[in-house]
Image: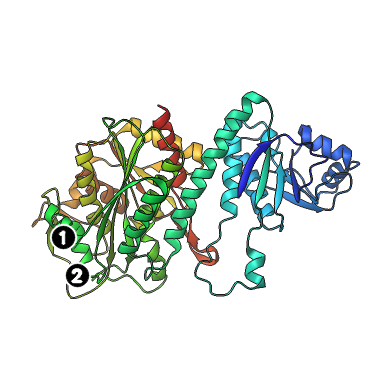
Amino acid sequence: MKIQLSSPDLLDARTDCLVVGVRENAQQPQSTRKIDKATKGLIGSLMRSGDIDGRPGSALMVPSPAGIEAKRLLLVGVGDKPDVDDFANATRAAARQLCSSRSVSAVVALTEIAVSGADPRARARMLSQAIEEAGYRFNQLKSAKGKEAARRECTVKRVTLLGGSTKNDASMRKGIQEARAIAHGVSLAKDLGNLPGNICTPSYLANQAKKLGKSHKLKVNVLDEAKMKALGMGALLSVSRGSREPARLIIMEHQGGSRSDPPVVLVGKGLTFDAGGISLKPAGAMDEMKYDMCGGASVFGAMVAAAELNLKLNVIGIVPSSENLPDGAANKPGDIVTSMAGKTIEILNTDAEGRLILCDALTYAERYKPAAVIDIATLTGACVVALGHPATGLFTPDDDFADELIACGETARDRAWRMPIWDEYQKQLDSPFADMANIGGRTAGAVTAACFLARFTKNMTWAHLDIAGTAWHSGANKGATGRPVPMLVRFLINRAQA
């Protein structure tokens, strides 16, 4: 999809769809007034009749409007004095309508709407990203592309956003560029997450990383099990013992800063399928455990976006990847393994395997002397119970780092909520036989999981993102969300600019 900025005459624009904003109880935007006059009061008439009322996210498609050249006119409600939430609702509604309209081209005037808390660059980014993401479809594994499948495809190929002053246009083009890179990262994360476990194996992920290395000029290194064993990664390798698929540790590097600059390191859980091991999960919805690698997928997405934006920042993505299956060689409750850091871990539940592969990857990350480390993982069902699906759980002992990440989530509309990681919770991980247990009991499961990881990050500025509630949708609209790629990329952009 091509998204560009221009200032066409809206009345003469030969496009499949013209999109304008409608306010609820206030004076209409300039473009809307212009279109209303050319169509002899059509918009005012539709508002008086109640067909469109201007509430944020409301939308009405008008076919073949007389008085303008566009084939369709899409009216989108933006509220009275729209804030960022109102504008986000409006952009999503516009994007959905566009992608279901069979339009190939569109001219969108929503960028002229004044939004509290969003400058022209932010408005262009939000609108472009909404349109890009609305066009996402996962149909790679469907054998037939019949009429029904074709009907569901998004046909939009060319979108023109309405520009304004020369000063704002440069900023808006930057927003479009950011949106394109973020959308590409989100789409990649969705693709990897939606692939089934029999295709997306640890080796498959490693091969995808190598392809991205060539296409996006990333330095890629993949460690096999022999190399991991030589490094002492006993926790990570204990998880893969129950699978016929060998584990892989994937390292991707974007060298955008000087060689002496400490990098930002992203560590993503890459469990390509999690049956729970000997502590077997219930059968219901177990197919969704292919999404247990969405943390790793988000690292892939963030690395692609960093490369496409050519960020002046050193970024390293580390993805420990394995399967967790029951087998005669698999971990057993009561087993004790030794991590790369030399700490011994009593495995009381083999379904708490994500922290086992992450702890060795975090220890490996320390060799880079990073400026900051963020791990991303579908780690605990307890986080879903605590926060539901709107918010990612954020854990860090560093107040400034927490504030920085929360602000990035707000800007990216990819929110996180800070959770406690106090020392009082650490005692729940006590073991009579090892340095620690891999679970802390029934209470505060998301917190004790983060406390476990904190034991391996004492020498680093570190944050943990638990995305168990935000990484995918269940039900009729089942599918990966690509979160938290937008938050991560916003963090990287801000760090690069700083």
Q: In the rendering, which numbered label is found on residue 387? A: none
Q: Is residue 157 above or below residue 87?
A: below
Number of residues whose C-alpha sits closer than 10 Å to that of mark 1, classed few (under 14), some (14–19) or many (20 or more): few
Q: How is the image coloured?
A: rainbow
Q: Which x, y percent locates residue 43?
A: 83, 43
Q: Which x, y percent locates residue 336?
A: 12, 61
Is 309 placed left or right of 229 in the picture? right
Q: From this viewpoint, which residue is outermost toward the top?
A: 167
Q: Nearer the viewer, residue 241 or 2?
A: 2
Q: Quadrant of the C terminus?
A: top left
Is 240 placed left or right of 254 in the picture? left
Q: From this viewpoint, which residue is outermost toward the front?
A: 214
Q: Nearer the viewer, residue 208 or 148?
A: 208
Number of residues whose C-alpha sits closer than 10 Å to that of mark 2, classed few (under 14), some (14–19) or many (20 or more): some
- Per the model, the C-alpha gap separating discs 1 and 2 is 18 Å
The residue lying at 23 percent from left, 46 percent from top is 362
The residue lying at 33 percent from left, 32 percent from top is 399
Q: Nearer the viewer, residue 6 or 437?
A: 6
Which of labels 1 and 2 is toward the front?
1
Q: Which x, y percent locates residue 446?
A: 32, 51
Q: Label 2 amino acid?
A: Ala
Residue located beneath label 2 in the image: 330
Q: In the rendering, which numbered label is found on residue 226? A: 1
The quarter holding residue 437 reads bottom left
Is residue 343 at least partly visible in the picture?
A: yes
- Please tell me whether mark 2 sits on a helix, a strand or a loop: loop
Nearer the N terminus, badge 1 or badge 2? Answer: 1
Is residue 347 at least partly visible in the picture?
A: no
Is 393 placed left or right of 182 in the picture? left
